[in-house]
Amino acid sequence: MSTDSLAATPDDTAGDAPVPRLTVGYLATPSGADGVALGVALARVTGADLDLVCVVRPVPYDGSPGIAQYQRRLEDQAAQWLREGAALIPPGFRYRTIVTVNDSFADGLISHAVETGAKMIVVGGTGDGLLRRHTLGTVSNELVHSSPVPVALAPRGYSDRVDTVLGTVTVAVPVEPDADNPLPFAEKLVERAKLNLRLLSLVSLESPFDDDSSRDARRAQIAVARELLDRTRAEVSPELEVGVVVADGDTLDEALANLPWGDDDIVAVGSGHLAPPHRVFLGSTAARILRWTTSPVIVVPRSR
């Protein structure tokens, strides 16, 4: 493992509270740059330190001479990529660049995040999706189905928004009473980062009919959703700026398509019911939110 670091600015060490850390997975690709930009956006509002991590697979030993030297060259190349990635970080942010060896890039990021007590793992998706949309690659897909640490995903092209100042955390409030709720995580993030909070509920009838009965059922669903959001808002600290929105459509995809997203938004979603306790598992509704939103998304581990 190799590490480079940038000295702290005076404000970075102010106060007695521990400085949070973010593990940012990096490859020399457009999605790697997207992940760095999201890490910077989160660090800008939370005061977190950044760990830029590149994972190198070990070269299997087969008895051939020069294996150790070849492994070292791979690690040196990764260190060079990390220096290029660090050049994307604006002045004034604390960061380290770290090369670690693991058979799996995702497992290497998870191990580093757990060892350092990181608050989140931050990555880009892939570079072959629609601009400003999410497409999961191999690493991000593994992370959102196994990580014990919240996973923050940057949409394609987020590196073009390197100067973004996050302003609002949108929380997808689950309708089912036994579903995992990302709200406690979002509240902590909002309080630390001094962001606004927006509570979101999705309503879709998923009915092929447009008749009085269907319209009545839809109105009833909307009323239930609004009541749920009002109850949820009443449970949130009164010191927080909280908005509520019901996204409505004939289908869930239409409801999501009708929902406006700002450049300063970030979305928090909970894990699906298949998630083991304290692990991330991207559920079906969260996956559809990921497909439609143009904002970064944080997938929160199941709380129980």
Image (cartoon, grey):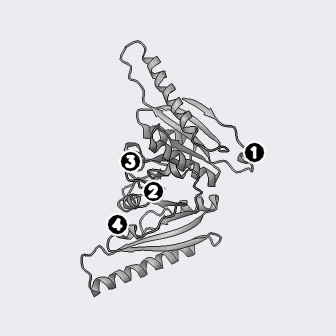
The tag earlier along the polypeptide, 4 or 3, is 3
Label 2: element kind: loop
Quote the CA–CA distance across marks 1 and 4.
Answer: 47 Å
Q: Nearer the viewer, mark 2 or mark 1?
A: 1
| Type of amino acid at the residue the image marks with label 4 | Asp
**Residue at position x 35%, y 80% from top?**
218
Quote the CA–CA distance across marks 3 and 1.
Answer: 38 Å
Residue 214 vertical placement versus 94 (above, below): below
Residue 268 vertical placement versus 18 (above, below): below
Is residue 125 or residue 49 the one in the foreground? 125
Indicate the position of residue 57 as horizontal and vertical percent values. Answer: 42, 30
The tag earlier along the polypeptide, 3 or 2, is 3
Residue picked out by circle 2: 302
**Residue at position x 27%, y 75% from top?**
207
Quote the CA–CA distance across marks 3 and 2.
Answer: 17 Å
Would residue 183 be visible to someone looking at this image? Answer: no
Residue picked out by circle 4: 253
Q: Is residue 210 left or right of residue 202?
A: left
Tag 3 near tag 2, CB within 8 Å: no
| Type of amino acid at the residue the image marks with label 1 | Pro
Residue 302 vertical placement versus 252 (above, below): above
Label 4: element kind: helix
Quote the CA–CA distance across marks 2 and 4.
Answer: 24 Å
The tag earlier along the polypeptide, 1 or 4, is 1
Would residue 116 be visible to someone looking at this image? Answer: yes
Residue picked out by circle 3: 141
Quote the CA–CA distance across marks 4 and 3.
Answer: 21 Å
